[in-house]
Amino acid sequence: MSTDIFEKRTFRAGDHIFREGDAGGEVFIVESGRVRIWRGDQMEKNTLGYVETKGIFGEMSLINNNPRMASATADVETICAIVPKDEFMRRFGEVNTFVRTMIKILACNIHSLTDYMEKQG
């Protein structure tokens, strides 16, 4: 997907992009930099992973219409293309019904597995 048509936003290292529990309003595509995906609070961050150039994040809350399951913070200066919810949902709606259902199931499974692993400590 070409990101040229989407708004670009620059985040400085340490900037919050969104927080766990926020409503999902857009999807982010990393054009440069790196984003940390984490759960917890400022004192005890549980890093789930990093998203780097050409990676996408923030999609699961839109796919399942749930609040953000984790926080996202720019790890270094990062430029992201912002895909608005309505555009993402329009494109997602064009996907074959079987594939769309499988993606929804996978997103739910990821959320459940993340919750389980966090509880295991």
Image (spheres, helix red, strand yellow):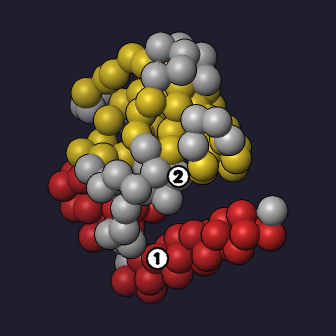
Residue kind at label 2, given as amino acid type: Ala
Q: Is residue 35 above or below residue 37?
A: above
Q: Position of residue 102 (x, y in %)?
A: 52, 81
Cα distance between the residues tagged 1 and 2: 17 Å
**Could you tell me which quadrant the N terminus lies in?**
top left
Residue kind at label 1, given as amino acid type: Lys
Q: Locate residue 60 relative to residue 112 in the image: left or right.
A: left
Q: Locate residue 10 relative to residue 35 in the image: left or right.
A: left
- The front one of 98 and 118 is 118
Whichever of labels 1 and 2 marks the residue nearer the N terminus, that label is: 2
Q: Position of residue 79 (x, y in %)?
A: 44, 20
Q: Locate residue 98 relative to residue 25 in the image: left or right.
A: right
Question: Which of label 1 and label 2 is nearer to you?
Answer: 2
Q: Is residue 88 visible?
A: no
Q: Which residue is mark 1?
A: 104
Q: Which residue is mark 2?
A: 70
Residue lying at the far front in this picture: please name it.
43
Q: Locate residue 20 relative to residue 114 in the image: left or right.
A: left
Q: Position of residue 26 (x, y in %)?
A: 30, 47
